[in-house]
Image (cartoon, rainbow, N blue to C red):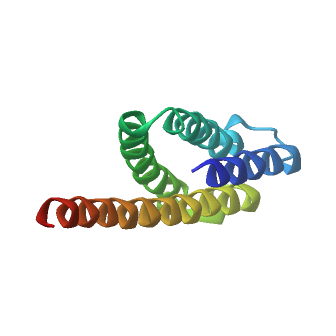
Amino acid sequence: TLAIGALLVALGGYAYTGSVSRSAMTLIPAFFGLAFIALGLLARRGDAMRRHAMHAAAALALAGIVAGTGPLAMGGTTRFPPLMIQATTGLMVLCAILLALAVRSFVQARRARRGATAG
């Protein structure tokens, strides 16, 4: 979560500095990244907090996937600058990776709990 957050902050910063218009829209990946970093740091506070923070990170990742589809659905590069499309595509890809890893982790944790109670 921390690594994905850092990559999103870097992506948002790159898109913003490379943008001619310096639009706040190019910073959207960075905003998601900062939220992921905060959740990743919260997760380090203990098992109970980790569970809640990672569920929140998974929900935020799903929101990031949906948010990234917006500019693509509204016309893509015909309506938005290519750099913004690249940034939102990067947001979608990184959020999809985080969501897949989170779901995998949730499944493994559930299996481990079942194995501990069955034995």
Picture quadrant where residue 26 is located? top right
Q: Residue furthest front?
A: 119
Residue closest to the eye, 115 or 80:
115
Q: Residue at x 15, y 59 (%)?
A: 117
Residue closest to the eye, 85 or 65:
65
Give the side of residue 98 with respect to residue 30, left or right: left
| Residue 110 in the image: above or below residue 36 | below
Tally of numbered discs: 0
Q: Residue furthest left?
A: 118
Q: Position of residue 62 (x, y in %)?
A: 40, 53
Q: Residue at x 78, y 49 (%)?
A: 10
Q: Quadrant of the C terminus?
A: bottom left
Q: Position of residue 2 (x, y in %)?
A: 63, 48
Q: Residue at x 49, y 50 (%)?
A: 64
Give the side of residue 15 with respect to residue 37, left or right: right
Q: Position of residue 53 (x, y in %)?
A: 43, 38
